[in-house]
Each structure stands twice: as C-alpha cells, then as structure tokens.
Amino acid sequence: MREQELKKLIIEWLNYQKGLYWVNNSGATISEYKGKKRLIRFGMKGSSDIIGIHPDIGFVAIEVKIKPNKPTKSQEDFIDMINYWGGFAMVAYDLEAVELEFLKRKLIT
C-alpha cells in the first residue's frame, strides 16, 4: 500500500468519528513567473499529514508513514509539541494503529 492510499483510509475512518479532520499538505514547489523561477513553500515544516479537531481533546495530528520509512526530526518535534500541549499526535503505519489509539483514549463514537 502507498502512503497516499493509507492517508485516504485513515481520513475516511476519521470522518465517521467525532470531530473534523483533513489532509494537511506541506512542502515546496518551483514556480516560474515572468521568466524567473522561484521556490514557493507551503504549510508548516514538520506538520503532520492529517490534522483535525476532536471535541473531547482538541487538536489531532497524525503523521502517516509506510514501513520502513520513519518520521523526520521536524515531524517528530511537531508530534512531541502537540502531545506536550495536550493534543493527540502519533505516527501511523496502518489504520489499525489509529483505531487502537482512539479506542485507548475513548475517542471513538
């Protein structure tokens, strides 16, 4: 399974739960305007692939990875920051991990 497919599965599952969730795109692209190339950055560096708001805990951030890939340092820092501030953040290698974490925290509707 590709990362994009896993993101889609997780978003579909989350949309059946309480709250609001969306895919959070970040990165950079090269744009050309009037013959000049420019690097355009978008999103916050390290921010998770899926962002959301859950009525019981607030901010939700899920970084989606396919094994053996691991989060970057900036992604780990973002996850740590969200958890430190009382939100819910995790790295997900499959849908079952997200379901289990939501179940553990009694967030499933």
Image: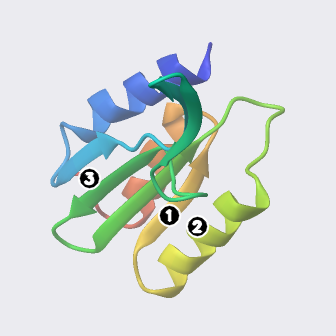
Reading the image, the residue beneath label 2 is 79
Q: Which image quadrant for residue 28?
A: top right
* Amino acid identity at mark 1: Ala
The x, y position of residue 52, in whole percent, is: 29, 55
Side (left or right) of 52 relative to 104: left
In-front residue for pair 42/106: 42
Horizontal side, residue 83 vs residue 15: left or right: right
Quote the CA–CA distance across marks 2 and 3: 21 Å
Q: Which residue is mark 1?
A: 89
Confirm or deny contact between disc 2 and disc 3 (CB under 8 A). no
- Label 2 sits on what residue type? Ile
The x, y position of residue 25, in whole percent, is 44, 40
Q: CA distance from mark 1 to mark 3?
A: 16 Å
Is 44 situated above or below 84? above
- Circle 2 packing at 10 Å, graded few (<14), some (14-19), many (20+), is many
Residue plotted at (51% across, 21% down): 4
Q: Are marks 1 and 2 in contact (CB under 8 Å)?
A: yes
**Observer-nearest of 107 and 11:** 11
Residue placed under numbered mark 3 in the picture: 108
Within 10 angstroms of label 1, few (less than 14), some, or many (20 or more) residues? many
- Determine which of the numbered discs, if any, sits on residue 38 in the image: none
Residue most extreme to the right: 68
Q: At x 58% / y 58%, what residue is drawn?
A: 45
Label 3 is placed on what type of residue? Ile
